[in-house]
Amino acid sequence: MAYQDSLTALSDPTRRKIFEAVAVEPQPVGRLAARLPVSRPAVSQHLKILSNAGLVQAKVDGTRRIYAIRQQGLAELRSYLDQFWDQVLASFSDEINREKGKP
């Protein structure tokens, strides 16, 4: 149920901003904290939650950790959400066929 952890992690607005920022470009904690109204330790805690949910990963670069999107975690979340899209498209197709008089 990895998607549940992802949805829970992304339910916080600050974590979503952090996630969106590292989606654009891998970044260290300091750069993320400079753009947010929360402390550097708070950003680190948010990153830990995102990491535990499988959405981000860190790469050690000297004394810094550079955070980036974890593609596999994003794929798991997308797979969960795509099932609803598939259902919507199937329902849309059924409705069009009904309007055309096709079974």
Image (cartoon, helix red, strand yellow):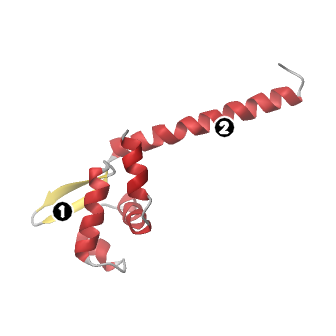
Q: Is residue 86 left or right of residue 97?
A: left
Between disc 2 and disc 1, the foreground one is 2
The crowding category of the residue bearing disc 1, from other C-alpha atoms within 10 Å (few below 14, some 14 to 19, many at least 20), is some
Q: How many marks?
A: 2
20 or 53: nearer the viewer: 53
- Above or below, 19 against 52 in this view is below
- Above or below, 88 against 36 in this view is above
For marks 2 and 1, the one nearer the N-term is 1
- Above or below, 102 against 88 in this view is above
Q: Is residue 25 left or right of residue 44?
A: right
- Residue drawn 36% across the image and 77% down it: 36
Q: Position of residue 99 (x, y in %)?
A: 88, 30
Quadrant (top left, top right, bottom left, bottom right) of the C terminus: top right
- Residue drawn 25% across the image and 66% down it: 45
- Residue drawn 30% across the image and 75% down it: 33
Query: Label 1, on which residue?
Result: 65
Q: Position of residue 59 (x, y in %)?
A: 19, 55
The amino acid on which the numbered mark 2 sits, given as a three-letter code, is: Val
Residue 49 visible in the picture:
yes
The amino acid on which the numbered mark 1 sits, given as a three-letter code, is: Arg
The crowding category of the residue bearing disc 2, from other C-alpha atoms within 10 Å (few below 14, some 14 to 19, many at least 20), is few
Query: Label 2, on which residue?
Result: 88
Element assignment for label 2 = helix
